[in-house]
Amino acid sequence: MVSEMTFDKALDILLVHCQGESGNVLLDGAPDIPGATIIEKMNHLNDVDPSLRLFLTREPRAQVVHTTNLLLPPTRPDADAAFIVLQPDRAHPMSGSNCICVVTALLETGRIRMSEPETLVRLDTAAGLILARARCEGGRCLSVSLDNVPAFVHGLDVAIDTPKWGRITGDIAFGGVFYAQIDVGRVGLKIVPEAARALAEAGTAIKALLAEQVAVSHPEIPGLDEIAYVMFRDYQPDGSVVTCTTLKPGRVDRSPCGTGSSANLAILHARGLATTGDKRISRSIIGGTFIAEILGETTVGGRPAVLPRITGQGYVFGRQQLRLDPQDPLTEGFALSDTWGPQVGEL
């Protein structure tokens, strides 16, 4: 049940994107979120009271491409700030492009003092502690390198039965959230802008099938137990990969996807195709790039894992204030299939 949301101040939102992917940052005005840790706060937003997320991520205040990152005080002493990724379907624990947007916002608004040429920012997330190294010059954040949480493989060549494409296979891996990564040719498509709608529909359909066929669970973090995204991939002869992460209810990531690129490093490592020190370029459907690097090896719950670093750039382009009108009948927002896609009813 959605509770009655109340907040007295206007919501102050910085408009940011990372390689074309919206990653707006809610700086001030949010109500207190119950929970002793960030994952408890995320679970509260998902399981108890989603009203703030609905207010921020649906029409008429947001469109299908908008994500809002809820900036919070850290719940652990070794972090400078915390954030939760708010998207139309739910609150998510981690996102590389959104993390880059948050770091850019913190530094360019002065909430964390910028040091040149590099500023270290430690972020408390529901997936764990993220160390960000921001390259700074002239008061601007020129790039952000994220030392992400360990990435590991759940299963390679996992069979997925589909009514449209028959039995296909994909790799299931964790890079901050769980991914199913599938060669795009298996669904008869290419990762090009004109195929974005078809890719979105294919990805959301496969995600629904995965929920019935494949169970996942992080061995060390209770509550991280769903395949959040389907990412289509197209490996290139030069070792780079073109990616297309699909998001409910029906759109594609504009960025190369940082957590997905981290999961891809774990997959390449598990297949013997990458090792410590190797770098790979991840390229998005619109041509944006991240650099994905394996910093080292570790284990997670006894499973082999890699330590990924993702480098990209965010851009601040505006500011917005939102307020709650208690008489507004659309405080929880709405979504229509003309823009949100055929699975809009699952929101």
Image (cartoon, rainbow, N blue to C red):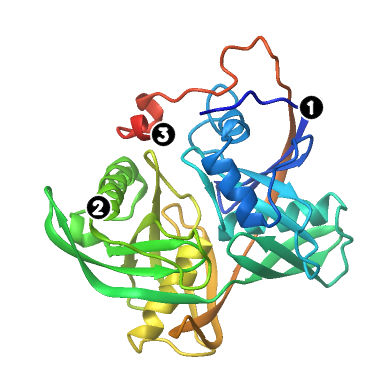
Q: How crowded is mark 1: few (under 14 residues within 10 Å), some or many (20 or more)?
A: some
Q: Residues within 10 Å of mark 2 (few under 14, many from 20)?
A: few
- Spatial separation of the CA atoms under disc 3 and disc 2: 18 Å
Q: Which is in the foreground here, disc 1 or disc 2?
A: 2
Task: Judge from the rendering whether residue 154 lies leftward or rightward of residue 281; answer left or right.
Answer: left
Query: 40 and 51: which one is in front?
Result: 40
Query: Tag 3 or tag 1, which sits nearer the N-term?
Result: 1
* SS for dot 1: loop
* Residue type indicated by callout 3: Leu
What residue is disc 3 on? Answer: 347
* SS for dot 3: loop
Q: In terms of image quadrants, where is residue 4?
A: top right
Task: Judge from the rendering whether residue 159 lies leftward or rightward of residue 81; answer left or right.
Answer: left
What residue is disc 2 on? Answer: 212
Please state the horizontal and vertical placement of residue 313, each as a whole percent of the image.
65, 60
What residue is disc 1 on? Answer: 10
Would you say the residues marked 3 and 2 are in contact, meaning their CB atoms lie under 8 Å apart? Answer: no
Q: In terms of image quadrants, where is residue 27?
A: top right
Query: 2 and 63: which one is in front?
Result: 2
- Spatial separation of the CA atoms under disc 1 and disc 3: 26 Å
* SS for dot 2: helix
Above or below 111: residue 269: below
Please state the horizontal and vertical placement of residue 62, each as a whole percent of the image.
57, 30
Image quarter where the C terminus lies is: top left
